[in-house]
Image (spheres, rainbow, N blue to C red):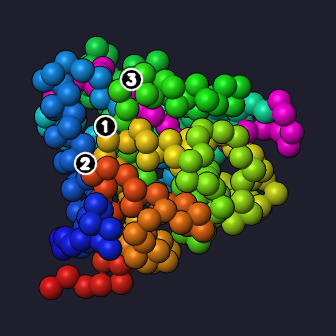
């Protein structure tokens, strides 16, 4: 692993040999925070994206949950977004059983993975999986603030347009949780994220998302995960950023507290010696 400072001295850059090492490093940070919360008997809010990027972190975290005998009943998963049905209001969530449903992802790919092997009393409780509500978007920010903020927000960047959650290029720095029209490039990227899509026409055109400003305001710490050859541009854009740029919304990581960019050698284009 190689560590360095980004151009913004508030953001560190960690380059790891491979995805497994990256996942373990971030999972260790999360476990340290969770253990502290557990000892203080307080709720721990973890900001979670869906998709490919965070899966290695969730997998490593699941192993550590068993090793450290963590009680997950105080863990709240704060999800970033979900697709919506329809092309005009009133919008509603897509079917939770749809292969691209972010709510399905939270239940199957995160909660079920972390809960595996845990007794029921130590599992993530269903009411502790939060999503932005298309019928009351602003309530999401209020709910997070009332809970004391997000201890750590795992973040991911769109490979070709830098979208974060469903915030498209051009999103203002101050934007809060809201309904957005998905950018064409974001929809194209999601053909890879959800390979069961057979064509772009199947990808919904609208989504509900946490805002760029919401992430920066409510995250006490943040971790951007980029790995693989298709994330080379994302690494370049984020590692060279010093402030938020609407052209690459994932650059909001530079304005988050305790921010770390986690990358592998492939995405970084560097070799570790």
Residue 139 showing in the rendered view: yes
The residue wearing badge 2 is 27
Q: Which residue is mark 1?
A: 151
Secondary element at image label 2: helix
- Identify the mark nearer the N-term, 2 or 3: 2
* Mark 1 Cα shell of 10 Å, populated few (<14), some (14-19), many (≥20): some
Residue at label 3? 147
Does 210 sit left or right of 153 as displayed?
right
Query: Considering depth in this image, is 121 or 152 the residue closer to the camera?
Result: 152
Q: How many marks?
A: 3
The answer to whether 197 appears left or right of 176 in the picture is right
The residues colored magenta run 69-90
Horizontal and vertical percent position of residue 165: 56, 50
The residue sitting at 59% across, 72% down in the picture is 160
Q: Is residue 74 above or below residue 181?
A: above
Tell me if label 2 and label 1 are in contact, CB under 8 Å: no
- Residue located at (29% from left, 23% from top): 43
């Amino acid at each position: 692993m190689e560590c360095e400072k980004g151009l913004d001295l508030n953001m560190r850059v960690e380059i790891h040999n491979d995805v497994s090492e990256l996942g373990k490093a971030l999972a260790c940070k999360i476990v340290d925070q969770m253990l502290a919360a557990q000892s203080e008997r307080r709720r721990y809010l973890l900001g979670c994206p869906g998709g490919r990027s965070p899966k290695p972190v969730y997998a490593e975290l699941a192993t550590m949950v068993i090793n450290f005998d963590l009680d997950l009943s105080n863990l709240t998963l704060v999800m970033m977004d979900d697709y919506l049905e329809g092309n005009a209001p009133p919008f509603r969530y897509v079917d939770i059983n749809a292969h691209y449903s972010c709510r399905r992802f939270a239940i199957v790919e995160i909660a079920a993975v972390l809960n595996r092997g845990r007794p029921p009393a130590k599992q993530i409780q269903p009411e502790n999986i939060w999503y932005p509500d298309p019928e009351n978007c602003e309530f999401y920010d209020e709910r997070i603030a009332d809970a004391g903020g997000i201890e750590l927000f795992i973040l991911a960047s769109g490979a070709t347009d830098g979208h974060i959650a469903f915030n498209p290029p051009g999103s203002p720095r101050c934007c809060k949780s809201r309904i957005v029209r998905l950018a064409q490039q974001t929809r194209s990227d999601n053909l890879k994220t959800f390979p069961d899509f057979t064509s772009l026409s199947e990808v919904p055109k609208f989504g509900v998302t946490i805002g760029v400003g919401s992430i920066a305001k409510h995250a006490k710490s943040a971790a951007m995960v980029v790995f693989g050859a298709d994330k080379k541009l994302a690494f370049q854009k984020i590692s060279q950023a010093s402030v938020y740029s609407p052209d690459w919304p994932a650059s909001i990581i530079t304005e988050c507290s305790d921010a770390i960019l986690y990358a592998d050698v492939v995405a970084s284009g560097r070799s570790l010696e």
